[in-house]
Image (spheres, rainbow, N blue to C red):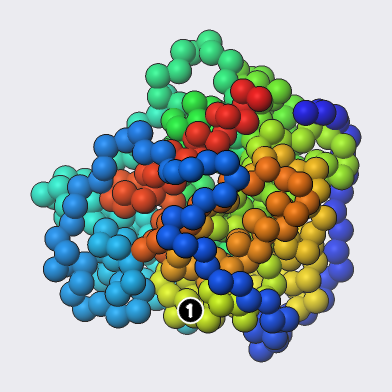
Amino acid sequence: MMKLARHAALGVSLLTLSVAAVPAFAQNTMAAPANGQMSGGTSSAMNTQEPAPSVDKAVAESETSGTQDRAHTEMAAVIKKLTDLGAKPFHTLSVEEARNQPTPADAVEAVYSEMNNGKPATPESVGKTENISIPGADGDIAARVYWPEGAASDAELPVVVYFHGGGWVVATIDTYDASPRAIANQAQAIVVSVEYSKGPEHKFPAAHDDAIAAYKYVVENAGEWNGDTDRIAVAGESAGGNLAINVAIDARDNEYTVPDAILAVYPVAGSDMNTQSYIDNQNASPLGKADVAWFVENYLNNMDEAKDPRIDLVNAELNDLPPTTIIAAEIDPLLSEGEVLRDKLDEAGVEVTYQRWDGTTHEFFGMGAVVPEAKDAQALAGTRLKAAFTE
């Protein structure tokens, strides 16, 4: 793959958003694939870890409604616990309240403890971590470097630049600590988890600009951590999945180091909130239709920006991108746009691996401590990243 270096900047006008306009997107529906359907030359998910302990089905089914009724047992237990901890739908909260309420990661820790006779949950073991500060687009931002467990101290390893989820409004690299740990171990790579500016304090395209600046910094400096930037990938969840794809597009367009692979976990990829998955999952937990509208209100400056190709990836120029793996959850309003993105990438000649996990919700990927499907998804991610690093 050609690797070039040159800097480019992004720009956009700043206007005012009306949340009342958020649902007014164009119609674009697409049916969900069959259970566990995968495309792109991979026939099944990999699972190299021990399965998560089972949870009492009666607990998972008690006081259930909506998401819990459709979720698999362990997933339902996490969603129920999230409610029990006091988490409320984002759209009912102020930004400050949303940033301080219990998270799915908190629910996973609580469920793990209940499943293991009160034993506290501990993070997945990695070789080591290091908190660093790196230049963003408009000032320094936090990042955390993860080394895989068992790697020799002098080993030159591939690098994954990871962007967390949270709708460009909530969450941090601490909230999303589990995912980069799993990716580091599964891909046997150094993972750099990047913080970025968030709305409403920093409106679009602040997070996107930070992601690009952070990626460029890692490309130039990963050697300090024995990182091999001839083997580099981008990864992200939800809003972070969108950022990962945007980084690859910007690198292609502006002729600097193009990543060898993209891992996009239920990425924000469209501007249509009338798709079949938005209809089916409008009241889903932890992410429903009104919650997405709330994120849009707090990050975008105005409704016209929803059609910007950096947000509306399904209508972006997708040719000449690196091999892309899309991981999807069934109970997720973003499901349909992920399917459309898969098909648009395929039409553009991009190698795509896609798998949907039924019975799971948005945010499931980092729940490997208690949700078996998360371990399967993490193993698939590692397999595809390792394959890209050896091509």
Q: Is residue 267 above or below residue 257?
A: below
Q: Nearer the viewer, residue 47 or 364?
A: 47
Provide the residue designation for mark 1: 280
Please tell me in which quadrant of the rendered image residue 285 appears: bottom left
Q: Is residue 386 above or below residue 99?
A: above
Q: Indicate left or right for 275 with 17 as reference.
A: left
Q: Is residue 104 visible?
A: yes
Q: Indicate left or right for 58 with 232 as reference.
A: left
Type of residue at label 1? Asp
Q: Is residue 154 above or below residue 48?
A: above
Could you tell me residue 320's position as x and y percent?
80, 43
- Residue shown at 14%/60% (left/top)? 56
Q: Please identify the quadrant where the N terminus is shown.
A: top right
Could you tell me residue 79's position as x and y percent?
32, 67
- Residue shown at 37%/44% (left/top)? 375
Q: Indicate left or right for 152 with 263 as reference.
A: left
**Residue farthest toward the bottom in the current orientation of the protein:** 20
Tally of numbered tags:
1
Q: Indicate left or right for 190 with 49 as reference.
A: right
- Residue shown at 66%/25% (left/top)? 391
**Residue farthest toward the left in the current orientation of the protein:** 117
- Residue shown at 23%/51% (left/top)? 112
Q: Tag 1, which secondary structure?
A: helix
Please tell me in which quadrant of the rendered image residue 88 appears: bottom left
